[in-house]
Image (cartoon, grey):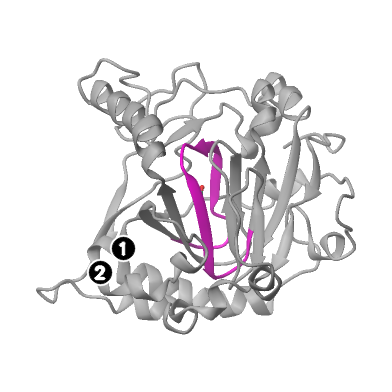
Amino acid sequence: MPTPTYLGPSFQLVDTISIQELTEQGGFQPRARPLLVKGAVKQWPAWGKWSFSQIADLRRKDGSEVVFKFQNGLVEQGVTLPPVVQPVGPYLRELEATAAQIRADWSQDTGLCPDRQWKQLKPGEKFHLNWAHLNSFKANKVYLAQWDILNEFPALRRDFAIRSLWKKWRWTWEYVFIGPANTVTGLHYDFPNNWFCQVRGVKEFLLFPPENRPHMCQSQKYDWGATLSDINISRLAEQPRESAEFAKTNGLYARVEPGDALFVPKQTWHCVVALEPSISLAVFGLTLPEIVLEGGPSECRSLLHRLHLYRWGNCTCHKMDKAPGGHDA
Ligand SMILES: O=C(O)CCC(=O)C(=O)O
């Protein structure tokens, strides 16, 4: 557990605007800083249609159950464990059953930035997080992470009017993240911009703009779309060097509530902790120049990786027995 005196990075609230204010201002303008848009998803059909039980009811064209390779523990740091292959239906029904109970038991004191503290914060005010929160639970459930649900069920694409936020043409791809309370996504950044849309549940999203890079302990572990960090936010006490570097960073805190959309600019380091069972959709997008300049190199690295010529044996996509660099997951 991080020592009680470990303060870690200093944080400020992420820039926040309501969808009504954003519309009055003429809509979203490209920017390099994260932006939390309150209520954006509430205007879209997904708000009424996407629930754990509705997704559990999805069937393939032949009427069979959807089976998925669930992420087994943290993949961004340490050893990547083999996925757990299982049907999504029973998993989602269990989340539906626990969601109401977790909401009923909601405590003002739970979280990295508990409600009690968060409600008092002013824009621009500096604060620290309660890292002990990550020791108050064991994240031991599998995660329905990075499911390209809209490719599998194209009719669902109409439920997200992402074009109303991103006006100019982009090549987009989408991943859904569905999981219980306390799922942790480790520190990393993605090469494209991302509109992260929260449909159900609350997530704490920690963001670190690119200038923090010297202190992010960039990892050698390979991932197709992401650059990973060696800093494991769930194991800070076991990582004195990484914790000390991490404490030098300046972060932004976003509490992403159901109905919100968070703009995560490319190369913004981030990690995510769920306070409740959640359904989120990450929409990644590349403009034409970005496809050539950023997508191209990423595809080359991917090819070299698959040919075992680039970071083979140290990646999020294949089974590993031991984490290079020493520590296990
Ligand atoms: O919601 C999560 O657990 C992870 C989301 C994320 O890392 C992303 O959208 O880039």
Residue contact between numbered discs 1 and 2, judged by CB atoms under 8 Å: yes
- Measuring from the top left, give residue 264's x and y in whole percent: 58, 49
**Is residue 21 found left or right of 271 in the rendered image?**
right
Q: Is residue 167 above or below residue 210?
A: below
Amino acid found under the numbered disc labelled 1: Ile
> Please, what secondary structure does the residue beneath circle 1 have?
helix
Q: Residue at x 50, y 51 (%)?
A: 194
Q: Residue at x 46, y 42 (%)?
A: 192
Q: Is residue 37 above or below residue 133?
A: below
Q: Is residue 189 magenta?
A: yes
Q: Is residue 313 magenta?
A: no
Q: Residue at x 13, y 73 (%)?
A: 61
- Measuring from the top left, give residue 159's x and y in whole percent: 39, 75
- Between residue 257 and residue 172, name the one nearer to us: 172
Amino acid found under the numbered disc labelled 2: Phe
The magenta stretch spans which residues? 178-203
| Residue wearing tag 1 | 149
- Measuring from the top left, give residue 185's x and y in whole percent: 53, 46
- Measuring from the top left, give residue 252's x and y in whole percent: 73, 46
- Report if residue 261 is visible in the image: yes
Direction bottom: furthest residue: 48
Direction left: furthest residue: 62
Q: Is residue 83 above or below residue 68?
A: above
| Residue wearing tag 2 | 153
